[in-house]
Amino acid sequence: MSESTAPDPADLSYEQARDELVAIVQRLETGGTTLEESLALWERGEALAEACQRWLDGARARVEPQDE
């Protein structure tokens, strides 16, 4: 999936973002990409990780008791 056609991480479910992030990490670990491709993958991975963190923070806020 090219960067221009990749969905916005904010529009993905937690599972979709996590699965794409795992695939990116595996691709970076195996190497064989140019520096430019690696940087683009890294940036996409950062955005996906942020989206996952927002999902987790939202879930935590729903299950933790609220101080009143």
Image (cartoon, rainbow, N blue to C red):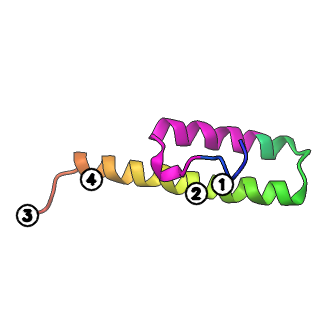
Nearer the N terminus, badge 3 or badge 4?
4
- Amino acid under disc 4: Ala
Q: CA distance from mark 3 to mark 2?
A: 33 Å
Crowding near pointer 3: few (<14 within 10 Å), some, many (20+)?
Answer: few
Residue depicted at x 56% and y 53%:
49
Where residue 18 appears, x then y in whole percent?
55, 40
Q: Position of residue 53 (x, y in %)?
A: 46, 53
Query: Hey, which residue is sitting farthest left in the picture?
Result: 68
Give the magenta part as a residue range: 7-26
Residue that extends furthest to the bottom in the rendered view of this protein: 68
User: Which residue has dot 2 on it?
Assistant: 47
Identify the residue under disc 1. 44
Nearer-N-terminus badge (1/3): 1
Which quadrant is the C terminus positioned in? bottom left
The residue lying toward the viewer, choosing from 68 and 53, is 53
The reply to whether dot 1 and dot 3 touch (C-beta < 8 Å) is no
User: What amino acid is found at the position of numbered circle 3 in the picture?
Assistant: Glu
Label 1 vs label 3: CA separation?
A: 38 Å
Q: Residues within 10 Å of mark 2 (few under 14, many from 20)?
A: some
* Front label number (4 vs 2): 2
Q: Mark 1 and mark 2 in contact (Cβ < 8 Å)?
A: yes
| Residue marked by disc 3 | 68
Instruction: Tell me the number on the disc at residue 19.
Output: none
Q: What residue does disc 4 label?
A: 61
In space, the residues marked 2 and 1 are separated at their CA atoms by 5 Å
In the rendering, at what x and y percent does residue 5 appear?
A: 65, 47
* Circle 2: residue type: Ala
- The majority secondary structure of the magenta stretch comes to helix
Q: Depth-wise, is mark 1 or mark 4 nearer the camera?
A: 1
| Picture quarter with the N terminus | top right
Q: Secondary structure at mark 2?
A: helix
Q: Identify the residue at image location x=53%, y=37%.
A: 16
